[in-house]
Image (cartoon, grey):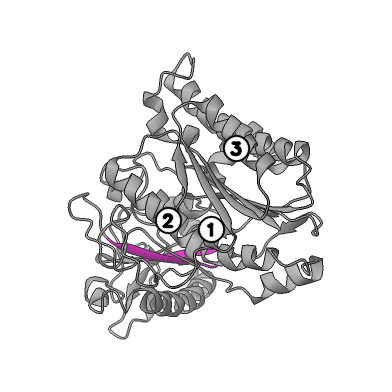
């Protein structure tokens, strides 16, 4: 069984829903596929996402001072792309700086950068025709904001340019699927298509000028995931799934014993919470004007903690995470929430007072209590070995009323 992984750069579920044509194209791929409605990235930047996906262990690179300078604490464990004799990575375009390129070469022993899109496609096809028992990683960065500087797209405006970039990344997915059938590999390949993070155009003050890399809000971490395996029928998956689980999903997919029953059992065994962060434990965000933040979601609520305190959002109603539900509570010295019959924060929209009442406040308190415990546990598991003082920088005992 071969494995092909396609990385969707800077494409989130929210952005797909803004462009029905793009959503329709990904949702209606010409193959049987498992579509995940509640898949979440483990981070808010590209190289971190690739490293997490390949390793399946979020603690592996936590000692790194930056994704550009990866420190591997478990080099003896195989990365996903190392489990087959032949592994190859194709990246288009080559807009990476020298440090980022070195980090990518740390993750891929055989990596080729392309500046010509036609050549990029041609080499993908040649590789798939010539090889068997392989893992192939494909990165088409046409959807990146960095491509707005590329004159290759003949667009009338920068907005059309940006849309065309995302369209071309999805067209690359179609090209790979067509090549699968042309090369008669459709019964010999599992295919994973995943997003790394979304973009936020300065709607959160904490962005510090960044469109991603900052706090793991829902519109940054809720990303698409599509999985194809020749032995599986189409599925619409509503389970919460974290990027951390992709390594196990693909390792299991290499087995010829996989079936729909096995797939359902695999999903049921996964954690029903998804954890994310914006920086490594050892990484400082000061130079980039970023603050370190961690989140956990159950697919309904998203809880975020940083040095400024905690904030929680109902992501189904508030997908961009601007309405901090904790604005209606006070934090007691013991860390418990106490409901107030008025909005503590001046930043909370007054219309939300129609939503919050005593009964609903209890529901929020229950959800917060579970998420707070899960988030604390996840941070400890991922970061303790890399930075034992991390909790000194995170404030679980204060509500961040200043969040937007």
Residue indicated by mark 1: 81
Q: Residue at x 40, y 78 (%)?
A: 381
Where 161 sits versus 318, above or below?
above
What secondary structure predominates along the stretch shown in magenta? Answer: strand
| Magenta highlight on residue 134 | no
Q: Is residue 303 visible?
A: yes
Where 123 sits versus 380, above or below?
above
Q: Earlier in the sequence, mark 3 or mark 2?
A: 2
Q: Which residues are magenta?
A: 292-304
Query: In the rendered view, does 309 fall on the left or right side of 275?
Result: left
Assess whether mark 2 and mark 1 are in contact (beta carbons under 8 angstroms): yes
| Mark 2 residue element | helix
Residue 305 coordinates in the image, percent (x, y): 34, 67
Q: Residue at x 49, y 68 (%)?
A: 78
245 or 181, nearer to the observer:
181
1 or 356, nearer to the observer:
1
203 or 77, nearer to the observer:
77
365 or 49, nearer to the observer:
49
Residue 263 is drawn in which quadrant?
bottom right
Badge number at residue 107? 2
Residue 256 coordinates in the image, percent (x, y): 77, 66
Badge number at residue 124? 3
């Amino acid at each position: 069984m071969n494995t092909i992984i396609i990385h969707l750069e800077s494409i989130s579920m929210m952005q797909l829903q803004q462009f029905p044509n793009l959503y329709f194209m990904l949702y209606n791929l010409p193959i049987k596929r498992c579509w995940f409605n509640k898949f979440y990235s483990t981070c808010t930047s590209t190289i971190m996402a690739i490293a997490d996906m390949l390793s399946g262990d979020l603690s592996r690179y936590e000692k790194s001072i930056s994704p550009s300078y990866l420190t591997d604490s478990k080099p003896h464990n195989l990365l996903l792309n190392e489990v087959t004799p032949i592994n190859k990575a194709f990246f288009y375009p080559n807009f990476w700086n020298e440090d980022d390129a070195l980090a990518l070469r740390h993750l891929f022993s055989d990596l080729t950068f392309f500046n010509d899109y036609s050549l990029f496609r041609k080499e993908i096809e040649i590789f798939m025709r010539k090889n068997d028992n392989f893992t192939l990683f494909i990165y088409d960065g046409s959807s990146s904001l960095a491509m707005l500087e590329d004159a290759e797209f003949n667009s009338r405006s920068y907005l059309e340019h940006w849309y065309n970039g995302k369209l071309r990344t999805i067209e690359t997915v179609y090209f790979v699927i067509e090549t699968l059938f042309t090369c008669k590999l459709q019964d010999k390949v599992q295919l994973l298509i995943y997003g790394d993070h979304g973009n936020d155009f300065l709607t959160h003050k904490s962005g510090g000028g960044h469109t991603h890399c900052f706090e793991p809000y829902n519109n940054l971490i809720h990303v698409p995931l599509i999985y194809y395996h020749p032995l599986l029928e189409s599925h619409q998956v509503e389970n919460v799934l974290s990027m951390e689980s992709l390594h196990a999903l693909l390792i299991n997919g290499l087995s010829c014993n996989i079936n729909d029953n096995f797939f359902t059992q695999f999903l049921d065994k996964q954690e029903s919470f998804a954890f994310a962060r914006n920086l490594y434990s050892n990484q400082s965000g000061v130079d980039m004007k970023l603050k370190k933040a961690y989140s956990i979601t159950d697919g309904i609520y998203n809880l975020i903690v940083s040095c400024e305190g905690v904030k929680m959002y109902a992501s189904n109603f508030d997908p961009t995470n601007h309405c901090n539900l904790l604005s209606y509570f006070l934090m007691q010295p013991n860390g418990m929430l106490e409901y107030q019959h008025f909005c503590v924060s001046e930043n909370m929209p007054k219309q939300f007072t129609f939503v919050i009442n005593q009964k609903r406040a209890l529901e929020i308190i229950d959800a917060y209590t579970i998420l707070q415990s899960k988030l604390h546990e996840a941070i400890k598991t991922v970061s303790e070995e890399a930075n034992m003082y991390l909790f000194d920088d995170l404030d679980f005992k204060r509500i961040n009323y200043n969040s937007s």
